Image: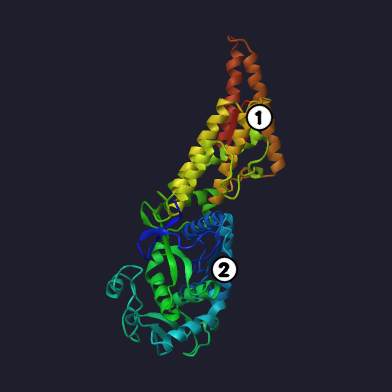
Amino acid sequence: MPLQVYSTLTRKKEAFPKKPGEPVGMYVCGPTVYKPAHIGHMVGPVIFDTVKRYLAYLGYKVTWVVNVTDVDDKLIARAGELKTTVPALAEKMTADYLECLKKLNVTGVDHFPRATGHIPQMVAMIGRLVETGYAYPAGGDVYFDVARDPDYGKLCNRDPEQLEAGSRVEVSDRKRNPGDFALWKGAKPGEPPEVQFDSPWGKGRPGWHIECSAMAKALLGDTLDIHGGGLDLQFPHHENELAQSESANGVPFARVWMHNGLLKMRSGKMAGSLGNVLNVADALKAVSGDVLRFFILQTHYRSPIDLGDWEPGAGVPSGLEAAKAAFDTFLRFAERVGRVLGTPFAALKTPGGGSAARTMAMRYVKRQQEFQAHLDDDFNTGGAVGVLFDLVRDLNKLADEHKLEDPGKESPARAEFAEGAGVFKEMCGLLGLTLATPAPALGGDDKLVSGLMQLLIDLRGNLREQAKGAAKDNPLKAALFAQTDLIRSRLAELGVTLEDRPGGTTWRAG
Protein backbone atom coordinates (compact mmCIF):
# COMPACT_ATOMS: atom_id res chain seq x y z
CA MET A 1 0.00 0.00 0.00
CA PRO A 2 1.43 3.42 -0.89
CA LEU A 3 1.83 5.99 1.86
CA GLN A 4 -1.56 7.31 3.01
CA VAL A 5 -1.90 10.49 5.08
CA TYR A 6 -4.99 11.97 6.71
CA SER A 7 -5.46 15.64 5.81
CA THR A 8 -7.51 17.86 8.10
CA LEU A 9 -8.51 19.97 5.11
CA THR A 10 -10.20 17.12 3.19
CA ARG A 11 -11.01 15.11 6.33
CA LYS A 12 -9.89 11.82 4.78
CA LYS A 13 -6.82 9.72 4.11
CA GLU A 14 -5.21 10.35 0.77
CA ALA A 15 -2.18 9.09 -1.13
CA PHE A 16 0.82 11.25 -0.28
CA PRO A 17 1.07 13.88 -3.04
CA LYS A 18 4.78 13.43 -3.79
CA LYS A 19 6.84 10.51 -5.05
CA PRO A 20 10.02 9.13 -3.43
CA GLY A 21 13.03 11.10 -4.61
CA GLU A 22 11.10 14.37 -4.81
CA PRO A 23 11.61 17.28 -2.39
CA VAL A 24 9.12 17.68 0.47
CA GLY A 25 8.67 20.94 2.36
CA MET A 26 7.28 20.52 5.89
CA TYR A 27 6.40 23.39 8.23
CA VAL A 28 5.43 22.80 11.86
CA CYS A 29 4.39 25.58 14.22
CA GLY A 30 6.88 25.97 17.06
CA PRO A 31 6.78 27.58 20.50
CA THR A 32 6.20 31.06 21.81
CA VAL A 33 9.32 31.22 23.96
CA TYR A 34 8.24 32.91 27.18
CA LYS A 35 8.37 29.98 29.63
CA PRO A 36 10.37 26.73 29.89
CA ALA A 37 9.25 23.91 27.59
CA HIS A 38 6.75 21.48 29.13
CA ILE A 39 6.16 17.96 27.88
CA GLY A 40 3.17 19.05 25.79
CA HIS A 41 5.57 21.13 23.73
CA MET A 42 7.45 17.95 22.78
CA VAL A 43 4.49 16.11 21.24
CA GLY A 44 4.57 17.83 17.85
CA PRO A 45 8.37 17.82 17.44
CA VAL A 46 8.64 14.10 18.28
CA ILE A 47 5.81 13.18 15.92
CA PHE A 48 7.05 15.22 12.98
CA ASP A 49 10.66 14.21 13.57
CA THR A 50 9.43 10.63 13.13
CA VAL A 51 7.47 11.63 10.03
CA LYS A 52 10.64 13.08 8.53
CA ARG A 53 12.68 9.99 9.44
CA TYR A 54 10.21 7.73 7.68
CA LEU A 55 9.85 9.94 4.63
CA ALA A 56 13.66 10.05 4.32
CA TYR A 57 13.74 6.25 4.66
CA LEU A 58 11.33 6.02 1.72
CA GLY A 59 13.58 8.25 -0.35
CA TYR A 60 11.98 11.69 -0.02
CA LYS A 61 14.20 14.75 0.35
CA VAL A 62 12.60 16.54 3.27
CA THR A 63 13.22 20.10 4.43
CA TRP A 64 11.64 20.70 7.83
CA VAL A 65 11.02 24.14 9.32
CA VAL A 66 9.96 24.89 12.91
CA ASN A 67 9.42 28.54 13.76
CA VAL A 68 10.20 30.32 17.02
CA THR A 69 7.83 33.11 18.06
CA ASP A 70 10.14 35.56 19.84
CA VAL A 71 7.86 38.63 19.84
CA ASP A 72 4.36 38.35 21.24
CA ASP A 73 2.03 39.75 23.90
CA LYS A 74 2.87 36.86 26.24
CA LEU A 75 6.59 37.55 25.91
CA ILE A 76 6.12 41.24 26.64
CA ALA A 77 4.05 40.52 29.74
CA ARG A 78 6.40 37.82 31.04
CA ALA A 79 9.53 39.93 30.48
CA GLY A 80 7.86 42.72 32.46
CA GLU A 81 7.13 40.33 35.34
CA LEU A 82 10.75 39.13 35.41
CA LYS A 83 12.19 42.63 34.94
CA THR A 84 14.16 41.57 31.87
CA THR A 85 14.06 42.36 28.16
CA VAL A 86 12.02 40.49 25.59
CA PRO A 87 15.11 39.46 23.57
CA ALA A 88 16.91 38.19 26.69
CA LEU A 89 13.89 36.15 27.81
CA ALA A 90 13.33 34.79 24.29
CA GLU A 91 16.98 33.76 23.96
CA LYS A 92 16.96 31.94 27.30
CA MET A 93 13.71 30.08 26.64
CA THR A 94 14.74 29.20 23.07
CA ALA A 95 17.92 27.63 24.43
CA ASP A 96 15.80 25.61 26.89
CA TYR A 97 13.51 24.44 24.07
CA LEU A 98 16.41 23.40 21.83
CA GLU A 99 18.06 21.50 24.68
CA CYS A 100 14.79 19.62 25.31
CA LEU A 101 14.59 18.63 21.64
CA LYS A 102 18.14 17.34 21.82
CA LYS A 103 17.33 15.20 24.88
CA LEU A 104 14.41 13.61 22.99
CA ASN A 105 16.58 12.97 19.90
CA VAL A 106 14.64 15.40 17.72
CA THR A 107 17.40 15.94 15.16
CA GLY A 108 15.61 16.51 11.86
CA VAL A 109 14.76 20.22 11.97
CA ASP A 110 16.57 22.03 9.14
CA HIS A 111 15.60 25.62 9.98
CA PHE A 112 14.53 27.39 13.19
CA PRO A 113 13.49 30.82 11.87
CA ARG A 114 12.76 33.51 14.43
CA ALA A 115 9.90 35.92 13.92
CA THR A 116 12.10 38.97 14.57
CA GLY A 117 14.40 37.87 11.76
CA HIS A 118 11.62 38.06 9.14
CA ILE A 119 9.86 41.37 9.84
CA PRO A 120 10.49 42.73 6.28
CA GLN A 121 8.87 39.65 4.73
CA MET A 122 5.86 40.05 7.03
CA VAL A 123 5.49 43.72 6.19
CA ALA A 124 5.69 42.89 2.46
CA MET A 125 2.97 40.21 2.73
CA ILE A 126 0.69 42.53 4.71
CA GLY A 127 1.26 45.20 2.08
CA ARG A 128 0.11 42.85 -0.68
CA LEU A 129 -3.03 42.01 1.27
CA VAL A 130 -3.82 45.70 1.75
CA GLU A 131 -3.22 46.44 -1.94
CA THR A 132 -5.55 43.66 -3.07
CA GLY A 133 -8.30 44.59 -0.63
CA TYR A 134 -8.02 41.58 1.66
CA ALA A 135 -6.77 43.73 4.53
CA TYR A 136 -7.28 47.25 5.80
CA PRO A 137 -5.33 49.65 8.04
CA ALA A 138 -7.13 51.02 11.08
CA GLY A 139 -5.47 53.48 13.45
CA GLY A 140 -2.00 51.94 13.30
CA ASP A 141 -3.30 48.37 13.20
CA VAL A 142 -3.90 46.29 10.08
CA TYR A 143 -6.67 43.65 9.97
CA PHE A 144 -7.51 40.83 7.60
CA ASP A 145 -11.08 41.17 6.32
CA VAL A 146 -12.59 37.68 6.65
CA ALA A 147 -15.65 38.76 4.67
CA ARG A 148 -13.42 39.21 1.59
CA ASP A 149 -12.36 35.56 1.65
CA PRO A 150 -15.18 33.25 0.48
CA ASP A 151 -13.24 30.15 1.60
CA TYR A 152 -12.64 31.34 5.16
CA GLY A 153 -13.44 28.51 7.57
CA LYS A 154 -12.72 25.64 5.18
CA LEU A 155 -9.97 24.10 7.34
CA CYS A 156 -12.34 23.82 10.31
CA ASN A 157 -15.35 23.11 8.06
CA ARG A 158 -17.36 25.94 9.63
CA ASP A 159 -18.65 29.29 8.50
CA PRO A 160 -17.11 32.46 9.99
CA GLU A 161 -20.05 33.08 12.34
CA GLN A 162 -19.72 29.62 13.90
CA LEU A 163 -15.98 30.10 14.31
CA GLU A 164 -16.46 33.48 15.92
CA ALA A 165 -19.06 32.13 18.34
CA GLY A 166 -16.85 29.25 19.43
CA SER A 167 -13.60 31.09 20.02
CA ARG A 168 -11.97 33.92 21.90
CA VAL A 169 -11.73 36.77 19.40
CA GLU A 170 -9.80 39.95 20.15
CA VAL A 171 -12.28 42.77 20.61
CA SER A 172 -11.61 46.08 18.87
CA ASP A 173 -13.87 48.89 17.67
CA ARG A 174 -11.45 49.33 14.76
CA LYS A 175 -12.56 46.12 13.08
CA ARG A 176 -15.07 45.95 10.25
CA ASN A 177 -16.16 42.47 11.36
CA PRO A 178 -15.77 40.89 14.83
CA GLY A 179 -13.91 37.91 13.30
CA ASP A 180 -11.27 40.02 11.54
CA PHE A 181 -7.79 39.28 12.87
CA ALA A 182 -4.70 41.43 13.32
CA LEU A 183 -1.91 41.31 10.77
CA TRP A 184 -0.07 44.24 12.34
CA LYS A 185 -0.44 45.65 15.87
CA GLY A 186 0.39 49.30 16.37
CA ALA A 187 2.74 50.09 19.24
CA LYS A 188 1.00 50.83 22.53
CA PRO A 189 2.13 53.38 25.13
CA GLY A 190 4.68 51.94 27.54
CA GLU A 191 5.73 49.01 25.37
CA PRO A 192 9.50 48.47 25.24
CA PRO A 193 11.29 49.76 22.13
CA GLU A 194 12.70 46.31 21.27
CA VAL A 195 9.20 45.12 20.26
CA GLN A 196 8.51 48.11 18.01
CA PHE A 197 9.37 47.75 14.32
CA ASP A 198 8.98 50.17 11.43
CA SER A 199 6.18 49.71 8.89
CA PRO A 200 4.11 51.80 6.46
CA TRP A 201 1.39 51.88 9.12
CA GLY A 202 3.64 53.14 11.90
CA LYS A 203 5.71 51.42 14.56
CA GLY A 204 4.39 48.16 15.89
CA ARG A 205 4.82 44.41 15.62
CA PRO A 206 3.35 41.60 13.51
CA GLY A 207 0.33 39.56 14.46
CA TRP A 208 0.94 35.93 15.42
CA HIS A 209 -0.61 34.39 12.31
CA ILE A 210 1.28 36.44 9.70
CA GLU A 211 4.59 35.37 11.25
CA CYS A 212 4.17 31.75 10.19
CA SER A 213 2.85 32.60 6.73
CA ALA A 214 5.84 34.82 5.97
CA MET A 215 8.48 32.46 7.38
CA ALA A 216 6.98 29.42 5.61
CA LYS A 217 6.97 31.28 2.30
CA ALA A 218 10.54 32.55 2.78
CA LEU A 219 11.97 29.08 3.44
CA LEU A 220 9.66 26.67 1.59
CA GLY A 221 7.86 28.69 -1.09
CA ASP A 222 4.21 29.54 -1.67
CA THR A 223 2.90 25.96 -1.29
CA LEU A 224 3.96 23.59 1.47
CA ASP A 225 3.73 19.81 1.13
CA ILE A 226 2.94 19.31 4.83
CA HIS A 227 1.76 21.84 7.38
CA GLY A 228 1.68 20.39 10.88
CA GLY A 229 0.87 21.39 14.42
CA GLY A 230 -1.26 20.65 17.44
CA LEU A 231 -5.02 20.25 17.18
CA ASP A 232 -5.41 23.35 19.35
CA LEU A 233 -3.85 25.43 16.54
CA GLN A 234 -6.42 24.46 13.91
CA PHE A 235 -8.44 27.55 14.83
CA PRO A 236 -7.73 30.36 14.83
CA HIS A 237 -4.03 30.07 13.97
CA HIS A 238 -4.01 27.67 11.04
CA GLU A 239 -7.33 28.85 9.65
CA ASN A 240 -5.97 32.39 9.58
CA GLU A 241 -2.61 31.31 8.16
CA LEU A 242 -4.38 29.54 5.33
CA ALA A 243 -6.65 32.51 4.56
CA GLN A 244 -3.94 35.16 4.48
CA SER A 245 -1.40 32.99 2.60
CA GLU A 246 -3.77 31.94 -0.17
CA SER A 247 -5.15 35.48 -0.47
CA ALA A 248 -1.63 36.90 -0.77
CA ASN A 249 -0.06 34.23 -2.98
CA GLY A 250 -3.00 33.07 -5.09
CA VAL A 251 -2.14 29.34 -4.76
CA PRO A 252 -2.95 26.58 -2.22
CA PHE A 253 -0.99 27.07 0.98
CA ALA A 254 -0.49 23.39 1.91
CA ARG A 255 -1.12 20.08 0.16
CA VAL A 256 -1.56 18.17 3.43
CA TRP A 257 -2.61 19.52 6.84
CA MET A 258 -1.63 17.26 9.76
CA HIS A 259 -2.84 17.92 13.31
CA ASN A 260 -1.58 15.93 16.27
CA GLY A 261 -3.65 15.12 19.33
CA LEU A 262 -2.92 16.88 22.61
CA LEU A 263 -1.54 15.76 25.92
CA LYS A 264 -4.22 15.18 28.54
CA MET A 265 -4.49 14.05 32.14
CA ARG A 266 -7.25 12.16 33.90
CA SER A 267 -8.11 15.37 35.70
CA GLY A 268 -8.34 17.38 32.47
CA LYS A 269 -6.17 19.51 30.22
CA MET A 270 -2.55 20.41 30.95
CA ALA A 271 -2.01 24.13 30.47
CA GLY A 272 0.18 26.90 31.80
CA SER A 273 -2.92 28.93 32.59
CA LEU A 274 -4.06 26.13 34.92
CA GLY A 275 -0.71 25.88 36.68
CA ASN A 276 -0.48 22.14 36.10
CA VAL A 277 2.31 21.77 33.54
CA LEU A 278 5.17 19.30 33.83
CA ASN A 279 8.33 20.86 32.46
CA VAL A 280 10.54 18.67 30.30
CA ALA A 281 13.54 19.29 32.55
CA ASP A 282 11.58 17.94 35.55
CA ALA A 283 10.22 14.94 33.63
CA LEU A 284 13.75 13.99 32.55
CA LYS A 285 14.78 13.69 36.18
CA ALA A 286 12.46 10.67 36.40
CA VAL A 287 12.64 9.15 32.91
CA SER A 288 15.06 9.22 30.00
CA GLY A 289 14.51 11.15 26.78
CA ASP A 290 14.01 7.78 25.07
CA VAL A 291 11.16 6.93 27.44
CA LEU A 292 9.50 10.31 26.96
CA ARG A 293 9.74 9.91 23.18
CA PHE A 294 8.39 6.35 23.40
CA PHE A 295 5.52 7.59 25.59
CA ILE A 296 4.47 10.00 22.83
CA LEU A 297 4.87 7.54 19.94
CA GLN A 298 2.99 4.63 21.50
CA THR A 299 -0.25 6.47 20.63
CA HIS A 300 -1.41 7.30 17.10
CA TYR A 301 -0.49 10.92 16.47
CA ARG A 302 -4.09 12.08 15.85
CA SER A 303 -5.28 10.67 19.20
CA PRO A 304 -5.04 12.31 22.63
CA ILE A 305 -1.99 11.24 24.65
CA ASP A 306 -2.96 10.17 28.16
CA LEU A 307 -0.54 11.23 30.88
CA GLY A 308 -2.67 9.45 33.46
CA ASP A 309 -2.97 10.57 37.06
CA TRP A 310 -0.80 13.48 38.10
CA GLU A 311 -0.81 16.69 40.08
CA PRO A 312 2.05 19.19 40.40
CA GLY A 313 4.52 17.99 43.02
CA ALA A 314 3.01 14.50 43.10
CA GLY A 315 5.90 12.60 41.52
CA VAL A 316 5.93 10.86 38.16
CA PRO A 317 2.63 10.71 36.19
CA SER A 318 1.19 7.21 35.96
CA GLY A 319 1.31 7.30 32.14
CA LEU A 320 5.05 7.95 32.19
CA GLU A 321 5.59 5.21 34.79
CA ALA A 322 3.78 2.72 32.55
CA ALA A 323 5.77 3.83 29.52
CA LYS A 324 9.02 3.46 31.46
CA ALA A 325 8.11 -0.09 32.48
CA ALA A 326 7.17 -1.02 28.90
CA PHE A 327 10.26 0.58 27.39
CA ASP A 328 12.42 -1.36 29.83
CA THR A 329 11.62 -4.43 27.70
CA PHE A 330 13.59 -2.85 24.85
CA LEU A 331 16.48 -1.82 27.09
CA ARG A 332 16.81 -5.34 28.51
CA PHE A 333 16.77 -6.74 24.99
CA ALA A 334 19.48 -4.31 23.85
CA GLU A 335 21.62 -5.49 26.77
CA ARG A 336 20.94 -9.09 25.80
CA VAL A 337 22.09 -8.39 22.25
CA GLY A 338 25.44 -7.31 23.70
CA ARG A 339 25.76 -10.53 25.70
CA VAL A 340 24.73 -12.83 22.85
CA LEU A 341 26.74 -11.21 20.07
CA GLY A 342 29.64 -9.80 22.08
CA THR A 343 29.12 -6.37 20.53
CA PRO A 344 27.25 -3.34 21.91
CA PHE A 345 23.77 -2.73 20.57
CA ALA A 346 24.89 0.70 19.31
CA ALA A 347 27.49 -0.95 17.06
CA LEU A 348 25.04 -3.43 15.56
CA LYS A 349 24.66 -3.42 11.77
CA THR A 350 21.21 -2.79 10.29
CA PRO A 351 19.77 -4.02 6.96
CA GLY A 352 19.72 -0.40 5.78
CA GLY A 353 17.89 1.68 3.24
CA GLY A 354 14.65 -0.25 2.93
CA SER A 355 16.15 -2.31 0.10
CA ALA A 356 13.94 -5.06 -1.30
CA ALA A 357 17.00 -7.21 -2.05
CA ARG A 358 17.30 -8.59 1.47
CA THR A 359 18.03 -12.19 2.31
CA MET A 360 16.55 -12.12 5.80
CA ALA A 361 14.75 -15.01 7.39
CA MET A 362 11.08 -14.88 6.46
CA ARG A 363 9.95 -14.13 10.00
CA TYR A 364 11.96 -10.89 9.99
CA VAL A 365 10.80 -9.94 6.51
CA LYS A 366 7.24 -10.33 7.83
CA ARG A 367 7.91 -8.16 10.88
CA GLN A 368 9.58 -5.49 8.75
CA GLN A 369 6.61 -5.48 6.36
CA GLU A 370 4.16 -5.20 9.26
CA PHE A 371 6.12 -2.31 10.72
CA GLN A 372 6.20 -0.43 7.41
CA ALA A 373 2.51 -1.13 6.76
CA HIS A 374 1.63 0.69 9.99
CA LEU A 375 3.75 3.71 9.11
CA ASP A 376 2.34 3.72 5.55
CA ASP A 377 -1.11 3.96 7.12
CA ASP A 378 -1.02 7.61 8.24
CA PHE A 379 2.20 7.24 10.24
CA ASN A 380 0.64 4.87 12.78
CA THR A 381 3.50 4.76 15.27
CA GLY A 382 1.32 3.04 17.86
CA GLY A 383 0.94 0.03 15.57
CA ALA A 384 4.65 0.15 14.70
CA VAL A 385 5.56 0.04 18.40
CA GLY A 386 3.42 -3.09 18.72
CA VAL A 387 5.51 -4.77 16.01
CA LEU A 388 8.66 -3.92 17.98
CA PHE A 389 7.32 -5.86 20.96
CA ASP A 390 6.42 -8.79 18.68
CA LEU A 391 9.93 -8.84 17.24
CA VAL A 392 11.57 -8.74 20.67
CA ARG A 393 9.40 -11.67 21.74
CA ASP A 394 10.48 -13.61 18.63
CA LEU A 395 14.16 -12.95 19.30
CA ASN A 396 14.03 -13.67 23.02
CA LYS A 397 12.35 -16.99 22.24
CA LEU A 398 15.08 -17.80 19.73
CA ALA A 399 17.83 -16.96 22.25
CA ASP A 400 16.16 -19.05 24.97
CA GLU A 401 15.52 -22.10 22.77
CA HIS A 402 19.10 -22.20 21.52
CA LYS A 403 20.68 -21.09 24.81
CA LEU A 404 22.57 -18.35 23.00
CA GLU A 405 23.81 -16.82 26.25
CA ASP A 406 25.58 -19.99 27.37
CA PRO A 407 29.33 -19.25 27.36
CA GLY A 408 31.21 -21.04 24.60
CA LYS A 409 28.08 -22.52 23.00
CA GLU A 410 28.16 -22.29 19.21
CA SER A 411 24.91 -22.25 17.28
CA PRO A 412 23.85 -21.29 13.74
CA ALA A 413 20.90 -19.54 15.39
CA ARG A 414 23.31 -16.82 16.56
CA ALA A 415 23.58 -15.45 13.00
CA GLU A 416 19.79 -15.43 12.70
CA PHE A 417 19.56 -13.63 16.05
CA ALA A 418 22.01 -11.00 14.79
CA GLU A 419 19.94 -10.52 11.66
CA GLY A 420 16.73 -10.02 13.61
CA ALA A 421 18.42 -7.72 16.10
CA GLY A 422 19.60 -5.59 13.17
CA VAL A 423 16.03 -5.30 11.91
CA PHE A 424 14.93 -4.29 15.42
CA LYS A 425 17.62 -1.62 15.58
CA GLU A 426 16.58 -0.23 12.18
CA MET A 427 12.96 0.01 13.34
CA CYS A 428 14.02 1.78 16.53
CA GLY A 429 16.04 4.24 14.47
CA LEU A 430 13.01 5.09 12.33
CA LEU A 431 11.15 5.95 15.53
CA GLY A 432 14.13 7.89 16.86
CA LEU A 433 14.70 5.56 19.82
CA THR A 434 18.39 5.25 20.69
CA LEU A 435 18.17 2.52 23.37
CA ALA A 436 21.25 4.02 24.95
CA THR A 437 21.78 2.35 28.31
CA PRO A 438 21.14 4.91 31.07
CA ALA A 439 24.13 5.84 33.18
CA PRO A 440 24.10 4.34 36.69
CA ALA A 441 21.98 6.58 38.90
CA LEU A 442 24.02 5.96 42.03
CA GLY A 443 26.19 9.07 41.98
CA GLY A 444 29.92 9.26 42.43
CA ASP A 445 32.69 8.19 40.11
CA ASP A 446 31.57 5.66 37.46
CA LYS A 447 34.74 3.57 37.82
CA LEU A 448 34.37 3.45 41.58
CA VAL A 449 30.68 2.53 41.35
CA SER A 450 31.40 -0.23 38.86
CA GLY A 451 34.20 -1.58 41.02
CA LEU A 452 32.04 -1.64 44.17
CA MET A 453 29.21 -3.31 42.29
CA GLN A 454 31.54 -6.00 40.99
CA LEU A 455 32.84 -6.54 44.53
CA LEU A 456 29.26 -7.10 45.79
CA ILE A 457 28.49 -9.43 42.89
CA ASP A 458 31.66 -11.46 43.58
CA LEU A 459 30.87 -11.59 47.30
CA ARG A 460 27.33 -12.75 46.61
CA GLY A 461 28.66 -15.33 44.13
CA ASN A 462 31.06 -16.74 46.75
CA LEU A 463 28.24 -17.01 49.28
CA ARG A 464 26.07 -18.85 46.78
CA GLU A 465 28.84 -21.32 45.95
CA GLN A 466 29.41 -22.00 49.65
CA ALA A 467 25.69 -22.51 50.17
CA LYS A 468 25.46 -24.95 47.26
CA GLY A 469 28.42 -26.89 48.61
CA ALA A 470 27.00 -27.19 52.11
CA ALA A 471 25.21 -30.35 53.17
CA LYS A 472 21.44 -30.31 52.91
CA ASP A 473 20.94 -30.54 56.69
CA ASN A 474 23.65 -27.98 57.48
CA PRO A 475 22.01 -24.92 59.12
CA LEU A 476 24.71 -22.76 57.54
CA LYS A 477 23.23 -23.44 54.10
CA ALA A 478 20.05 -21.44 54.76
CA ALA A 479 22.03 -18.65 56.41
CA LEU A 480 24.32 -18.30 53.39
CA PHE A 481 21.38 -18.16 50.97
CA ALA A 482 19.73 -15.59 53.24
CA GLN A 483 22.83 -13.37 52.88
CA THR A 484 22.70 -13.59 49.08
CA ASP A 485 19.01 -12.61 49.17
CA LEU A 486 19.83 -9.71 51.50
CA ILE A 487 22.41 -8.33 49.05
CA ARG A 488 19.91 -8.53 46.19
CA SER A 489 17.06 -6.92 48.14
CA ARG A 490 19.16 -4.07 49.58
CA LEU A 491 20.50 -3.25 46.12
CA ALA A 492 16.94 -3.29 44.77
CA GLU A 493 16.01 -0.68 47.36
CA LEU A 494 18.77 1.49 45.86
CA GLY A 495 17.35 1.00 42.35
CA VAL A 496 19.86 -1.66 41.27
CA THR A 497 18.71 -4.92 39.66
CA LEU A 498 20.87 -8.06 39.65
CA GLU A 499 20.31 -10.57 36.87
CA ASP A 500 21.76 -14.09 37.16
CA ARG A 501 22.59 -15.53 33.74
CA PRO A 502 24.53 -18.55 32.42
CA GLY A 503 27.53 -16.33 31.73
CA GLY A 504 27.47 -14.70 35.17
CA THR A 505 25.62 -12.02 37.11
CA THR A 506 25.02 -8.58 35.62
CA TRP A 507 23.58 -5.42 37.14
CA ARG A 508 21.72 -2.35 35.95
CA ALA A 509 20.47 0.80 37.63
CA GLY A 510 17.06 2.41 37.26
Q: Which mark is residue 149?
A: none
**SS at mark 2?**
loop
How packed is label 2: few (under 14 Cα within 10 Å), some, or many (20 or more)? some
The image shows residue 351 at horizontal and vertical percentages of 60, 44
The answer to whether residue 432 is above or below residue 222 is above
- Name the quadrant containing residue 263: bottom left
The image shows residue 58 at horizontal and vertical percentages of 54, 54
The image shows residue 463 at horizontal and vertical percentages of 65, 21
**Quadrant holding the C terminus:** top right
Q: Coloring scheme of the render? A: rainbow
Is 401 in front, or is 363?
363
**Relative to 442, is 20 on the left or the right?**
left
**Relative to 397, is 415 on the left or the right?**
right
**Relative to 24, is 185 on the left or the right?**
left
The image shows residue 382 at horizontal and vertical percentages of 44, 48
**SS at mark 1?**
helix
How packed is label 1: few (under 14 Cα within 10 Å), some, or many (20 or more)? many
Q: Does residue 188 appear in this view?
A: no
Q: Name the residue under label 1.
A: 457
Q: Name the residue under label 2.
A: 112
Say whether disc 1 or disc 2 marks the residue closer to the N-terminus: 2
How many dots with numbers? 2
- Residue at left offset 55%, top offset 81%: 194
- Residue at left offset 69%, top offset 43%: 446
- Name the quadrant containing residue 454: top right
